[in-house]
Image (spheres, grey):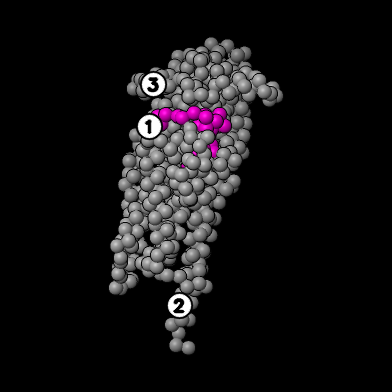
Amino acid sequence: TSINIMEDEYFGEDNQKKENDRNKFINPETINRLRDHQVTFNLGIFLEFFWYHILFYVFLGPLVNLIYLKRLNLMGNLGFFGNSFDFYFQTFFYINNMVNISLYFLTTNQNVYFLEILFTIFIIILRCYIIAAKYATLHEDKIQLYKNYYIERQYRILDFYLKNWAQQNYQTIYRETYNSIQRGEIDQALFYISFFVDPNNQIQTEIEQMNNELSKQHKYTSSKFQSNSYNQVQNGKMFYGYGIIGYIIQQYKKTQIYSKSIPYLCIILALVRSSIPIAFRYLYQKNINLCNYEVIQLAMLFFNTFLGYSISFVFLFNFIRDLKLKLFCQLQCQLMLQVKKEHKAEKKCLPTIDITNPYSLKSWSILRRILLDYGKSYFLRLQSYLSFYLFYILFNLILVFLWVTNLYQLNLIYPFICFYELTVTFSILLYMLFLGALINEKFEKFDIILGDHQIIFKDILRMEEIYSDNENQGKISNFVFKKSIFKIKQYVNDNNILFKEHLNSLLDGIESCKLELQQDSINQPLTFFGIKITLPLFQSIVAGLTTAFVALAQVYLQIHQQKNSPL
């Protein structure tokens, strides 16, 4: 049992003794042993930390420390206090925004659009929302640690989305695998995978090296990193699941040239977005007279917009990368279960698992479940972030609708910016939904493949008197049947009685895999606003958006034709 999860937390009731024992562990020295695996989105914590950041960014800036003098450790951990880069950067961000907003409302300038101020406020709220969502997914023990102790930055960045998680280093791979195992209450002694044919020597070496690196990150518990296996493999090797997971993730990183281009793509999109108001002024306005403070204000607005949208796009594109990682991992699980690939373009990183071994079937199911659950806290953060972004898209849609229908007179800058926002955000959002639908489709694919294996073993069981007879081995024409029967006979040492028992054990193992698959399809599908994303749903969304766009275009043309009509 993990030393950070006391045995009396299981099955028993809550009491003060439990609370006191738990609090003994909550200090900076045991930060690696806190229960990161217990992941939920805590609305109370979200609102609390959202309030802290609204106070800092919108109202008080560094003066917020005067209100929370008794919480200076927390203020320091939030970057609101102390001699640190975080404090100076956030203070600069606060001053920049407040100067912009104040100048707009306190002066009579005509060259700064209200929409620019509105988007500045949006960027502030978005930043507060993103940070608060991070804390909302942390366990209450860690929140208590943040409130009662000052945490060194090297430990705080472990929870940053764009640090270790984005890099997928050894520490992150170990931590997220361990957390998934704890959430799933998985017996690690079952997490050994054997293959129908052993991987080549290079792959075996890489898996072993990965295991060695991950074992160095084993700081959560006092138990040893690698448990002894129940699985007994003849004429083959077993591989510990941690190394398999690390190997698959490393293979994904090698194939992703896209990830390296994310910063440049975000910079380009943010530059275009920041330049639209400036370009509009010079293209559609004549005789622009800018006073000194307006020049400064426009420069600050450009910087704020560029910074805010750069960060926003980085989150969105990294979420796409995370969805691709999850899809890649689920695809590898599919290929490891299939006896052969269906499409030549698919890259199979590891051989097919030993489908004739019940333990290997179980370990495959564990692997699939861990890779589906992998990085759960980060996905919860990003799902909440997308929820906020959807309201922002809705705001842009309302502005476009008002302009198209001519219900409200808007400056031409509004549709320019809104059309850009909608084009970029809808494209990104639709691509995310498409990836989510492909991931959810894997549940059905796994069920079909398991059903195919079930049919094979039921056929062998039905004709077991024939297939167990060595004299008939040369008559078997089907390659999969022949190899499967050969493997099974190796396991049972040509014992005909054990041959039948082994087949029944395999069929039970497949049923167990299908049951776990059914549970995950109910409890862990990728959802958007609580709705499971499927390919038919995605197609309906695309069709609906296309219809709405065409309808708006027709309304716009009709209104302008009526305006231009001589009658």
Mark 1 residue type: Gln
**Residue 220 location, x and y as percent?**
49, 21
Q: Nearer the viewer, residue 188 or 192?
A: 188
Mark 3 residue type: Glu
Q: Secondary structure at mark 1?
A: helix
Residue at left offset 54%, top offset 21%: 25
Choose the circle earlier in sequence order: 3 or 1.
Answer: 3
The N terminus, quarter of image: top right
Q: Secondary structure at mark 2?
A: helix
Q: Is residue 140 magenta?
A: yes
Task: Give the extent of the magenta segment.
Answer: 131-154
Q: Secondary structure at mark 3?
A: helix
Choose the circle earlier in sequence order: 3 or 2.
Answer: 3
Q: From the viewer's perspective, is residue 233 above or below residue 62? A: above
Q: From the viewer's perspective, is residue 302 above or below residue 473? A: below
Residue at left offset 52%, top offset 32%: 147
| Residue 114 appears in the figure | yes
Q: Which residue is mark 2?
A: 560
Q: From the viewer's perspective, is residue 493 above or below residue 21? A: above
Q: Nearer the viewer, residue 394 or 448?
A: 394
Q: Which residue is mark 3?
A: 213
Q: Which residue is mark 1?
A: 251
Query: In the image, is 272 to the left or to the right of 478?
Result: left
| Residue 423 appears in the figure | no
